[in-house]
Amino acid sequence: MDALRFRLLASLSLAAPWSLHAQQPAADATTAAGPATTPAHDADSLAKALSNPVAALISVPLQYNYDQTYGDDGYRHTLNIQPVVPISISAHWNLISRTILPVAYQKDVIPGTDQAGIGDITQSFFLSPKQPTASGVIWGIGPAMLLPTGTDDLGADTWGLGPTFVVLKQDHGWTYGALANHISDVGGVGRHRADISNTFLQPFLSRAFAGGRTLTFNLESSYDWTARQWTVPLNIGYSKVTQLGGQMLSFQGGVRAYLEKPEGGPDWGLRFTVTLLYPR
């Protein structure tokens, strides 16, 4: 696999992870007298809400990823800025806008070079019912787009487009489901344009605990149809919902191991996420 294709596959894999949000708006934890300590049931409600990617909750996750070792000693730092905005379009339907802007620095991912700047933006829209089905299933479907905003050889120099969907269920503290998308290039903008045909599949499982705590497992599987290559990191994360002053926050830390990767790909990684929450 050439260096450009591998860099792109890694970038798309990191861009695809979703941060977790609420199906229904959570109660505001502040009172007329001002900010108070977050009640346990409010933290628990938000933590449960954060296990659902089709949100009726405005949030801004700031997700930091570190991955190594590429080749002999290469590494990559990525900060994904991921604002999520729900829009009520009728009495029964929401449209969820989710934007992912990666800011990255990498060294020796392409041997003997380093790059710093922003990557390509991934923009997704999910049309989702405001209420689960009678059997408790929550789902959303819509388009995913790749916008060629990358700088310093961190982008694909092409527009991408394809479908995305999510399906999940929440029951007795457990959340389980899967998110998927497929993005193909639809038009280049530069001489380094990459041919993209990339499928992302993320099965996920989480368990909620008292005090706004959640343990999460997921596989961020990505398949490059052109190179016929899987990249499969297993992520394990632990998060806690809390309140700082008047701001509701979620803090998450986690590790990942690459179960499958291209030749020269990373072995392991770390993830730390701070999510600003804006319950209505």
Image (cartoon, grey):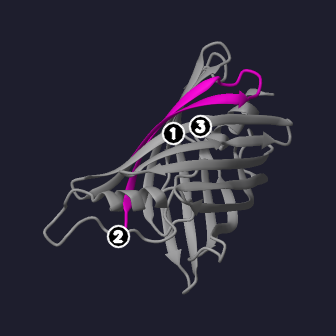
Residue type, label 3: Asn
The front one of 133 and 272 is 133
130 relative to 134 in the view: left or right: left
Residue at image position (34%, 61%) is 41
Q: Position of residue 166 (x, y in %)?
A: 67, 61
Residue 172 appears left or right of 194: left
Please report the bounds of the magenta region as a residue range.
Answer: 251-279
Determine whether the residue tagged by mark 1 lies in a helix, strand or loop.
strand
Q: Judge whether residue 275 is colored magenta.
A: yes
How far, Cα to Cα, is label 3 from label 2? 30 Å
Q: Horizontal placement of 153 versus 85: left or right?
A: right
Instruction: Label 3, secondary structure: give it.
Output: strand
Relative to 73, is 179 above or below? Answer: below
Q: Which residue is mark 3?
A: 235
User: Marks 3 and 2: CB-CB under 8 Å?
Assistant: no
Q: Is residue 115 visible?
A: no
Q: Provide residue 25's location: percent of width, then percent of height.
A: 43, 71
Q: Residues within 10 Å of mark 2 (few under 14, many from 20)?
A: some
Residue visible at 56% across and 37% down in the picture: 236
Q: Which residue is mark 1?
A: 237
Residue occupied by mark 2: 27
Front position in the image: 4 or 229: 229
Question: In the figure, residue 14 lies in which quadrant?
Answer: top right
